Image: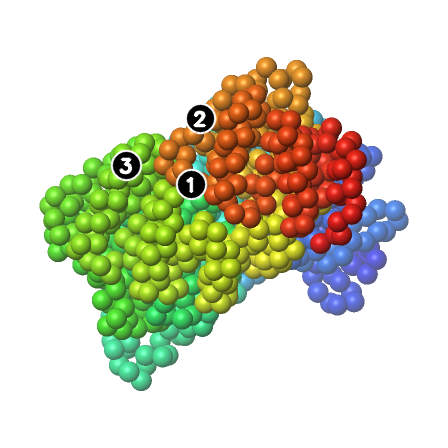
């Protein structure tokens, strides 16, 4: 082929050949530039599978546009033979680079491994966001530009999510040495398979060995499927433990144990970069001139020339920063641009350096307290918006890229905590969430008995990173309720860390023990009592044991006696009273909280709920709207107002709020789950199914599965609805509604009806337990009434729904349940009256027409008159 001209490309040499394709270097005669031409290998020209892969690569890579993915210029054809035209990458492959180092008896430095991993990860993340899974990530498919930037190539085995298989069922696609276990077994591969392959590639870079070396392919496949690789530090002890942890997670045999998205892996690589002793380059090849000085990990390492150079440079920077004329110039010289004026910040989980389980609560606690302090100054720093850590944890978000996709964050704060003996090192890094560039970093050292000093130092450093100055009022708010007892504070920090993972019941118990000891050591520790109250309320929510309600109230009251301005106490007391049906008292506490912090989102939400519970819908709406006016860029305000409109049957207004949200946070699964519920209520069932599926594709949740099951039920597709409800229960939901829905679905399928009574009884028991604590919860009571009707208890069903209607005011969802119960129990007159009122209030006619409980009612002439005579709203 050398010397031949194909179209307007003159072939100048062969670059390489694989199983399905051959690549030549060529000169573009029109633009006078070097390119790479890829043809199907001659021996594969008669293979339909090879041709399909060739065209699939063209479609896949043409849909992508990223600096870390090889660029395709065009698709051509000559004499009936198709070819692809790529940019020419003169730096060779990563495989070539590793061979060169091996021949010299060397391995890549940690700096080079991390830099390469970040760029491969960035390219793969872009592909995954566009629904493309590479399926053949390996050193031979990673190439360098002449300037040293890294690019992912060869998408010949790429799979579009939802497409049919490219390979035969059970056949292997990819290079065995880098295959994920699911690929090795011939199963479907998603983005997590690429994460495994990237982990295998990084493992080889770090050690010079494959994760699963073997003498033959069958042995290698058995090893991949059934054995974990050797820990990377057993082959290369100089690598940090955090890096070993990254590879261990990426190379987990079960996909669900790996990183959910490749951005999580790259975020952890950034943290490793942030604790490296080297003078590190940042990840973007276009900005290699920008560097950041970091420090060694504890304990101090022996001094070397490089270390002395780094420290000397750090000293020069410090001196320059202290000299006022240079203060504005230094950040720009070293790649640290000014932070954007509108800052939406996510504080991400900190890395527990060393991975020792006993230090995890300390790590989590320091992160949570730092986030809490940042939330306390939001009211003073008008441009700062903090994503609540509970929102991040609920969705399993641990990377800046995910936080940006879910919540539109512009900045992320990452960090690490390392403890050696009584020494504690806390490192914090400010990351640009769009470009995933580390903007600035700081390191704070302290002793375990001086955690208050370390925590204050960390917050001051973060304030500097974010470029805001703390005023006296802010400092006073931050110090409210603190203790001077170092041992009490250490117990408190650990307890806060445990409470951040309160989904594990044992963590709540451990936190309770630590907090009780903390307030014993300092009986005047207001913040300790406030958090003890929160922990006891969590204990109630976990166990539904009423004794914890009074215990929580006592702790909060003691905290109030010690410090009346502690907002955490006021919000917790508001939640306790709201959760026990004492709405007037709850209103008072939430108003107190808002007097201290007018932009506190949780207090606004609680106050609106208290008004709504008292039947004052107008005040509730005004409260939600006030929260939105105060924070027009905060997604939760739109969601809260949208849900309120949904409860009132004002679906058009609700849809408007959630449509706003899909633009603000286009990858938040909750938004699509909620939007699906609204579309369902408006009779737009197929659109609802699409919305639920979108939510589940981002993150499987019990709510989305349950809602999807409900829509299938409305469509009469019970065989599809039942697995959805069962899946929601498998995910650990303790919501009586899901059990009730599943029981109702079982009743609709004769072959499964025998399962219904036990499930419905479980729903009744769960609802009864909730009502023991809050007997004024009309939603729960109306559900209990319906479960009673399903179980055949007519008397109880009518009694409970009557009480629920008295408590609920004009809630259309409760009125709808009432209509169903009346019809099921033989009171058709009341059923028709309820339906007439529902339609006047704008309830979905299509939903009524499809309701299974109304099958016989729809034959009644009075029903048809009600449906036909009332105008659409």
Name the residue: 81% across, 53% down.
76
Q: Quadrant of residue 380?
A: bottom left
The residue identified by callout 1 is: 776
Label 1, label 2: how many angstroms apart (C-alpha)?
A: 17 Å
Which residue does the numbered mark 3 point to in the structure image? 548
Which residue, as the protein is rendered here, is positioned at the far bottom?
Answer: 325
* Of the image marks 3 and 2, the number of the one nearer the N terminus: 3
Upstream in the sequence, badge 1 or badge 2?
Answer: 2
- Report helix, strand or loop for mark 1: loop
Q: Secondary structure at mark 3?
A: helix
- Residue 343 locus on image (x, y percent): 44, 66
Where does the image place residue 836, in percent across and percent down from the top left? 68, 44
Residue 545 visible from this viewpoint: yes
Residues at circles 1 and 2 in contact by the CB criterion of under 8 Å: no
Q: Position of residue 456 (x, y in %)?
A: 23, 61
At horizontal 37% and vertical 55% (from top left) the residue drawn is: 587
Looking at the rendered image, the disc whose residue lies closer to the viewer, 1 or 3, is 1
- Judge whether 617 appears above or below 351 on screen: below
* On screen, residue 34 above or below 832: below
Indicate which label's residue lies in the foreground, 1 or 2. 1
Which residue corresponds to mark 2? 765
- At x 44%, y 44%, the residue is 394
Q: Residue 43 at x, y = what percent?
A: 78, 35
Say which quadrant the C terminus sits in. bottom right
Q: Which mark is residue 149?
A: none
The total of numbered circles placed on residues is: 3
């Amino acid at each position: 082929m050398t010397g031949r001209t194909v179209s307007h490309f003159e072939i100048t040499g062969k670059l390489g050949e694989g199983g399905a394709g051959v690549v030549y270097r060529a000169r573009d005669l029109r633009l006078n530039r070097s390119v790479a031409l890829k043809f199907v290998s001659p021996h594969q020209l008669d293979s339909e599978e090879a041709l399909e892969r060739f065209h699939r690569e063209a479609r896949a890579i043409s849909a992508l546009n990223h600096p870390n993915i090889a660029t395709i210029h065009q698709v051509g054809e000559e004499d009936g033979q198709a070819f692809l035209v790529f940019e020419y990458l003169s730096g060779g492959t990563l495989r070539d680079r590793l061979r060169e180092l091996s021949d010299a008896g060397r391995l890549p430095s940690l700096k080079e491994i991390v830099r390469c991993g970040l760029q491969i990860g960035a390219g793969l993340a872009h592909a995954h966001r566009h629904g493309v899974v590479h399926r053949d990530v390996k050193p031979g498919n990673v190439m360098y530009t002449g300037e040293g930037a890294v690019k992912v190539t060869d998408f010949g085995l790429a799979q579009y999510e939802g497409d049919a298989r490219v390979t035969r069922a059970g056949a292997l696609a990819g290079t065995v040495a880098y295959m994920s276990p699911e690929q090795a077994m011939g199963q479907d591969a998603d983005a997590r398979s690429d994460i495994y392959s990237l982990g295998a590639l990084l493992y080889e870079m770090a050690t010079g060995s494959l994760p699963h070396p073997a003498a033959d392919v069958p042995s290698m496949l058995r090893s991949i499927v059934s054995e974990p690789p050797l820990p990377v530090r057993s082959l290369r002890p100089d690598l940090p433990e955090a890096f070993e942890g990254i590879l261990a997670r990426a190379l987990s045999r079960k996909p669900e144990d790996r990183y959910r998205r490749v951005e999580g892996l790259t975020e952890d690589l950034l943290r490793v970069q942030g604790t490296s002793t080297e003078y590190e380059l940042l990840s973007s090849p276009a900005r290699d001139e920008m560097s950041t000085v970091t420090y060694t990990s504890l304990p101090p390492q022996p001094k070397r020339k490089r270390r002395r150079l780094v420290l000397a440079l750090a000293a020069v920077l410090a001196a320059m920063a202290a000299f006022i004329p240079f203060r504005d110039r230094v950040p720009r010289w070293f790649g640290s641009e000014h932070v954007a004026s509108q800052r939406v910040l996510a504080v991400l989980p900190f890395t527990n350096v060393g991975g020792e389980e006993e230090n995890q609560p300390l790590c989590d606690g320091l992160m949570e307290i730092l986030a809490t302090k940042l939330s306390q100054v939001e009211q003073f720093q008008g441009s700062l918006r903090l994503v609540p850590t509970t929102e991040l944890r609920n969705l399993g978000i641990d990377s800046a890229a995910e936080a940006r996709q879910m919540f539109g964050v512009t900045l992320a704060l990452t960090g690490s905590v390392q403890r050696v003996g009584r020494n504690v090192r806390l490192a914090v890094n400010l990351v640009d969430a769009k470009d995933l560039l580390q903007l600035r970093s700081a390191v704070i050292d302290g002793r375990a008995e001086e955690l208050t000093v370390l925590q204050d130092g960390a917050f001051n450093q973060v304030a500097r990173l974010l470029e805001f100055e703390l005023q006296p009022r802010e400092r006073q708010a931050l110090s409210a309720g603190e203790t001077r007892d170092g041992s009490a504070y250490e117990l408190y920090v650990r307890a806060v860390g445990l409470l951040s993972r309160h989904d594990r019941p044992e963590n709540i118990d451990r936190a309770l023990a630590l907090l009780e000891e903390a307030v014993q050591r300092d009986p005047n520790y207001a913040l300790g009592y406030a958090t003890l109250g929160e922990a006891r309320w969590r204990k109630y929510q976990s166990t539904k044991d009423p004794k914890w309600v009074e215990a929580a109230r006592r702790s909060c009251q003691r905290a109030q006696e010690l410090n009346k301005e502690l907002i955490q106490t006021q919000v917790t007391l508001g939640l306790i009273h709201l959760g026990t049906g004492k709405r007037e008292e709850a209103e008072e506490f939430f108003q107190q909280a808002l007097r201290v912090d007018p932009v506190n989102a949780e207090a606004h939400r609680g106050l609106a709920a208290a008004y709504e519970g008292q039947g004052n819908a107008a005040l509730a709406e005004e409260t939600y709207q006030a929260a939105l006016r105060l924070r027009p860029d905060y997604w939760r305000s739109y969601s809260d107002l949208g849900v309120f409109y949904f409860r009132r049957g004002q679906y058009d207004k609700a849809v408007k709020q959630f449509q706003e949200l899909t633009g603000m946070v286009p990858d938040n699964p909750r938004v699509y789950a909620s939007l699906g519920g609204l579309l369902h209520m408006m009779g737009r069932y197929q659109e609802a199914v699409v919305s639920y599926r979108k939510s589940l594709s981002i993150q499987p949740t019990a709510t989305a599965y349950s809602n999807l099951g409900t829509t299938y039920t409305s469509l009469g597709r019970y065989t599809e609805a039942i697995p959805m409800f069962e899946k929601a229960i498998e995910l650990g939901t303790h919501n009586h509604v899901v059990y009730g829905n599943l029981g109702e679905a079982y009743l609709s399928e004769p072959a499964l009806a025998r399962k219904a009574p036990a499930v419905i009884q479980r729903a009744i028991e769960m609802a009864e337990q909730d009502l023991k604590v809050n007997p004024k919860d009309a939603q729960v009571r109306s559900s209990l009434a319906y479960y009673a009707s399903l179980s055949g208890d007519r008397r109880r069903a009518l009694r409970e729904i009557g009480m629920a209607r008295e408590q609920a005011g004009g809630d259309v969802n409760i009125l709808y349940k009432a209509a169903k119960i009346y019809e099921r129990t033989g009171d058709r007159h009341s059923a028709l009256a309820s339906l007439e009122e529902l339609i006047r209030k704008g309830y979905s006619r299509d939903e009524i027409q499809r309701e299974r409980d109304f099958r016989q009612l729809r034959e009644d002439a009075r029903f048809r008159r009600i449906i036909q005579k009332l105008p659409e709203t």
